[in-house]
Image (cartoon, grey):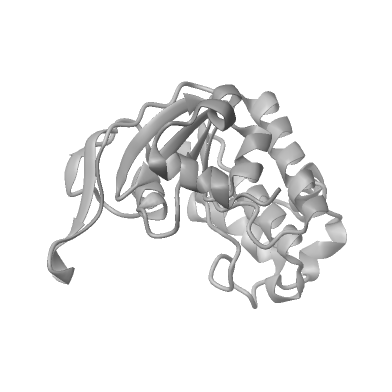
């Protein structure tokens, strides 16, 4: 995206973010970090085509870019079965999968086929995140996966398991990853590069290997100081 921005005119011209220039290399894993309210999630929704930009341009997109929402009561239809959730993306494209194919998709994200008959409301946070990932990975054109606070609410074991799964799928399909988060510890597990967002703009960019020792912007330092020992 180049010169990209989002302004909500109906809210009295409230600027969500921008202008932002953002280029992701094929197969790259990038962490977009910043405090809550800096515009990270809105930027992700624009990248995924769920909201239009009001400024600048977006190159690429379509079904090649998919967003996995932060786990919340709204992220998955809570009364739908896991089978219905997994089947939805391909049904919208006029395709159907057999129960065996749905079971294989669950197994690919480390979940047992027995979960197919369960509803989302009965799953743990870690299970819901994996189901959301399995649904997204069904899109054959997928090239860039956007993950909004992927580790939020997960215990350390579940977070490590999800990070390992994402790293495996990145290797297997050459996927690019964009992690939208305020959790630097989680971002450190997966990202090659860090972009720091403050007041709707990207204020610092560094390789992950250098960020923790050489971050310079006050917003970056504030995030580092907020990390637990």
Q: Is residue 211 left or right of residue 125?
A: left
Q: Against 13, is 53 above or below?
A: above
Residue depicted at x 63% and y 62%: 85
The image shows residue 151 at horizontal and vertical percentages of 65, 53
Please state the total of marks drawn on the protein image. 0
Q: Can residue 129 be seen in this view?
A: yes
Q: Is residue 49 visible?
A: no
Q: Is residue 57 left or right of residue 114?
A: left
Nearer to the camera, 228 or 92: 228
The image shows residue 195 at horizontal and vertical percentages of 44, 35
The image shows residue 167 at horizontal and vertical percentages of 70, 32
Q: Is residue 157 left or right of residue 136?
A: right
Nearer to the camera, 125 or 98: 125
The image shows residue 7 at horizontal and vertical percentages of 19, 56
Q: Quadrant of the N terminus?
A: top left
Residue depicted at x 81% and y 63%: 115
Residue depicted at x 64% and y 27%: 173
């Amino acid at each position: 995206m180049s010169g990209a921005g989002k302004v909500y005119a109906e809210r009295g011209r409230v600027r969500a973010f921008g202008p932002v220039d953002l280029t992701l290399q094929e197969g790259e894993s990038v962490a977009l970090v910043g405090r809550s309210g800096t515009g990270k999630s809105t930027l992700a929704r624009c990248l995924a085509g769920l909201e239009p930009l009001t400024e600048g341009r977006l190159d690429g997109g379509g079904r090649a870019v998919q967003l996995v929402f932060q786990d919340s009561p709204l992220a998955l239809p809570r009364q739908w079965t896991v089978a219905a959730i997994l089947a939805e993306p391909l049904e919208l494209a006029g395709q159907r999968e057999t129960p065996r194919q749905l079971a294989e998709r669950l197994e690919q994200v480390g979940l047992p086929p027995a979960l197919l008959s369960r509803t989302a409301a009965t799953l743990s946070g870690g299970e819901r995140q994996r189901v959301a990932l399995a649904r997204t990975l069904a899109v054959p054109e997928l090239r860039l996966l956007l993950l909004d606070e992927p580790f939020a609410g997960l215990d350390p074991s579940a977070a490590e398991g999800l990070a390992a799964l994402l790293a495996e799928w990145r290797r297997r399909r050459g996927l690019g990853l964009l992690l939208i988060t305020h959790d630097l510890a989680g971002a450190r597990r997966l990202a090659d590069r860090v972009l720091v967002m403050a007041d709707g703009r990207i204020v610092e960019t560094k390789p992950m290997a250098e960020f923790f020792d050489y971050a310079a912007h006050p917003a970056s330092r504030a995030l580092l100081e907020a990390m637990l020992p």
